[in-house]
Amino acid sequence: MNILFFGPNGSGKGTQGSILKDKYNTPHIESGAIFRENIGKGTELGAKAKAFIDKGDLVPDEITIPMILDRLQQDDCKNGWLLDGFPRNKTQAIKLDESLKASGMALDIVVEILLDRETAKNRIMGRRLCAKDPNHPNNIYIDAIKPTDDNKCRVCGGELSARGDDQDESAISKRHGIYYDADTGTLAAAYYFRDLAAASSDIKYIELDGTPGVKEVTAELVSKL
């Protein structure tokens, strides 16, 4: 089962990807991790990417897509993969689609988590990290996972803190501006695959309501896979 995941920052996309990874023993592949891995290993593509990153420039698709394809062809992906964080715009979606087909890899399912921009922003700003385990879910704006009354981790009682970038409204707005752009941004990429799915039975396009709690979203996702 090869899955492509879309959702705005704050939608719980990473959480759902992690759950699917454990449930189906499928690698959850994030584009940022691919860059770090290639740079860390000193690969040719990693060196090329680092040259752009060091200058503060975006890494061209001609470097990014081969990196992604190489990762999707590794042994742990033979029984399926879940790709998260790419493509970020319609042009990348088209190039990824063409590259997957040229490599003989089928895209089976595309998942889009639906969440309005204001709710997504509040979820980001409400996130709190546990000092003992950052994977313990705590959010001051979500009743189901609110910290304790004395602002401690709801799971283990550990001290909580907020990431600095989670409190930067301008940075959040910039990221969401790219995602919610349905003409050329990330939503345009998602809609490209939605149109492909509508025209072909080879791809299944799943829309999920991201407003309920994690368990409810997971239940809906699993029921639709």
Image (cartoon, rainbow, N blue to C red):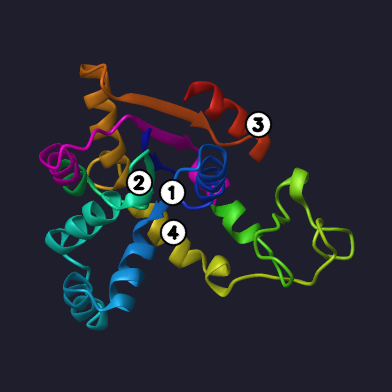
Instruction: Name the front one of labels 3 and 2.
Output: 2
Q: Nearer the viewer, mark 4 or mark 3?
A: 3
Distance from label 4 to label 3 (Cα)?
27 Å
Mark seen at residue 50: none
**Position of residue 223 measured from the top left corner of the image (x, y, whole percent):** 55, 22
Whole-angstrom CA distance, mark 4 to mark 1, is 30 Å
Q: Are marks 4 and 3 in contact (CB under 8 Å)?
A: no
Q: Mark 3, mark 1: which one is toward the viewer?
A: 1
The verdict on residue 153 being magenta is no
Residue named by callout 2: 77
Magenta-highlighted residues: 95-120
Residue type beneath disc 1: Pro
Above or below: residue 24 compared with residue 18: above
Distance from Cα at disc 3 to Cα at disc 2? 28 Å
Would you say 163 lies left or right of 60 here? right
Tell me residue 119's x, y (percent): 57, 45
- Amino acid type at mark 4: Ser
Asked whether the viewer can see residue 105, the reply is yes
First reached walking from the N terminus: tag 2 or tag 1: 1
Determine the secondary structure under disc 4.
Answer: helix
Nearest the eye: 4 or 1: 1
Disc 2 and disc 4: Cα gap in Å? 34 Å
